[in-house]
Image (cartoon, grey):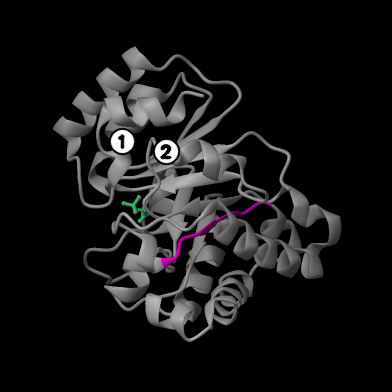
Amino acid sequence: MAMQRPVLAANWKMHHGPSSARAFMRTFLDLVDPLPGRQLIFFPSAISVSTIIEMTHDREDILVGVQNIHWGEKGAFTGEISAEMARDAGARVVLVGHSERRHVFGETDEESGRKVAAAVRAGLLPLLCVGELLEERERGETETVVLRQLRAGIREVDDHAVAGLLLAYEPVWAIGTGRTATPADASAIHRVIREELRARLGERADTVPVCYGGSVNRGNVSELLAADEVDGVLVGGASLDAQGWSSIVCP
Ligand code: PGA
């Protein structure tokens, strides 16, 4: 069990351009005083990252990240941003291997590994997401898929970097569907992830936060956070409304 404060991360996906991101954050900051016992992370769209960074620079409980990077440093990659550019803009974290990147945009395990390595080189903290599709779960392949994605995701970085990562288990069948894994399901897979990390890192593995994601909402967040081995949550739909998100992050 990681000993740090719980992580509550908001993945806004392709929602909230700069104007609505600003309006969200005004309401949110009015409602939520600094929460020293929690680590909040916002993943706005890249175009709204600077707005959110500016508005939260005095909040030590808030980190801001990007939802994706390219693994290269620079070059002819129209539409992409590099880890260095994200860091230069003030981002501190990056989502890697989110299921929409994997299954909508065809990101491979190997590419996720390259992105984790690029993030670490640039001083960005990767939040590596892993999780199985419904048909993989039904075939009994959950552990195989999760371990394959995890191993490929951390293959290119050294133990020190792995010990500093954030991870999220997000079963794809639970994302945006209203079907949440039970706390027991989440704990079981988080334990598999922890064992894999222990095999590589020994006791240092115990401080790597492993978050759960997939239809987390106000009604289920407390029991998920209380579950064994669940060190935080990564939230999509329920993070889009400032009042709703404030009611989720406030203990
Ligand atoms: P959801 O998304 O909370 O809307 O299920 C989670 C995610 O995709 O990170």
The front one of 66 and 5 is: 5
Amino acid type of the residue that numbered disc 2 sits on in the rendered structure: Gly
Identify the residue at horizontal 49%, vertical 42% (top origin): 92
Q: Are marks 1 and 2 in contact (CB under 8 Å)?
A: yes
Q: Quadrant of residue 57?
A: top left
Identify the residue at horizontal 25%, vertical 39% (top origin): 48
Alpha carbons under labels 1 and 2: distance apart: 7 Å
166 falls in the magenta region = yes
Q: Position of residue 166 (x, y in %)?
A: 58, 52
Under circle 1, the secondary element is helix
Residue 90: which disc?
2
Upstream in sequence: badge 1 or badge 2: 1
Residue 50: which disc?
1
Q: Position of residue 189 (x, y in %)?
A: 61, 65
Amino acid type of the residue that numbered disc 1 sits on in the rendered structure: Ser
The front one of 15 and 216 is: 216
Q: Position of residue 44 (x, y in %)?
A: 31, 43
| Vertical placement of residue 145 versus 69, above or below | below
Q: Can residue 70 be seen here?
A: no
Identify the residue at horizontal 32%, vertical 22% (top origin): 28
Q: Can residue 28 be seen here?
A: yes
Identify the residue at horizontal 22%, vertical 68% (top origin): 78
| Vertical placement of residue 145 versus 11, above or below | below
Under circle 2, the secondary element is loop
19 sits left or right of 69 in the view = left
Q: Residue furthest right?
A: 203
* Magenta stretch in the rendered image: 164-171
The front one of 176 and 42 is: 176
Q: Position of residue 175 (x, y in %)?
A: 34, 59
Binning the other alpha carbons within 10 Å of mark 1 as few (below 14), some (14 to 19) or many (20 upward) gives some
